[in-house]
Image (cartoon, rainbow, N blue to C red):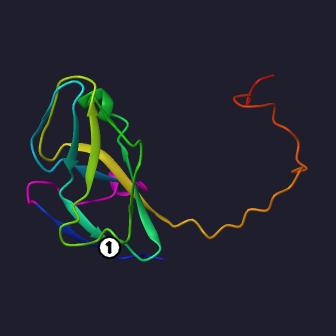
Amino acid sequence: MTETIKIKYFTDKIEKLAYIGGKSDWIDLRCAEEIQMKAGEFKLIPLGVAMELPKGYEAHVVPRSSTYKNYGIIQTNHMGIIDETYCGDNDQWFMAAYALRDTEIHVNDRICQFRIMEHQPALVFEETGELGNADRGGHGSTGKA
């Protein structure tokens, strides 16, 4: 099923959104203004877009694999979650970033990416004394002989 997402651009200086390579599940987001950061500095980097996500969906925003290498920044909350209620005309998306070295990020630089996911279904937790499954060997044990 194809969903339609209304999008508002805050600038005409960034490229319009498109799938990475035309086929990925992730869509790049771009820096909407010139940013200079000193090592140890935090900034909300404007991404130049606001969207109206379909009801029951949320966006997961994460850095691109090259973001730290290219810009020396990390996303402070490791993954941003934007739900469908954040859809007002001034609800611009941002990347919360922390600089580990002095850096410059330019308008239209691809710094993060997003995909939308359905909200988690309602869950009920049932307490039990045993789960009845084989143990895997403890934390970090996968692949050990």
Residue 95, placed above or below residue 73: below
Residues rendered magenta in the picture: 11-26
Q: Residue at x 86, y 55 (%)?
A: 128
Location of residue 87 in the rendering, given as x and y in whole percent from the top left corner: 28, 71
Viewer-closest of 12 and 35: 35
The one nearer the camera, 111 or 89, is 89
Binning the other alpha carbons within 10 Å of mark 1 as few (below 14), some (14 to 19) or many (20 upward) gives: few
Q: Residue at x 19, y 43 (%)?
A: 109
Q: Is residue 13 magenta?
A: yes
Residue 59 in picture, x, y percent from top left: 40, 60
Residue type highlighted by circle 1: Ile
Looking at the image, residue 116 sits to the left or right of residue 68; the answer is right
Q: Position of residue 64 (x, y in %)?
A: 35, 41
Q: Is residue 74 magenta?
A: no
Please tell me in which quadrant of the rendered image residue 110 appears: top left
Residue toward you, 89 or 126:
126
For the stretch drawn in magenta, what is the main secondary structure?
Answer: loop
Name the secondary structure under disc 1: loop
Instruction: State the residue position of label 1.
Output: 5
Query: What residue is drawn where x is 43% and y is 56%?
Result: 25
Residue 143 image position (x, y, % from top left): 74, 28
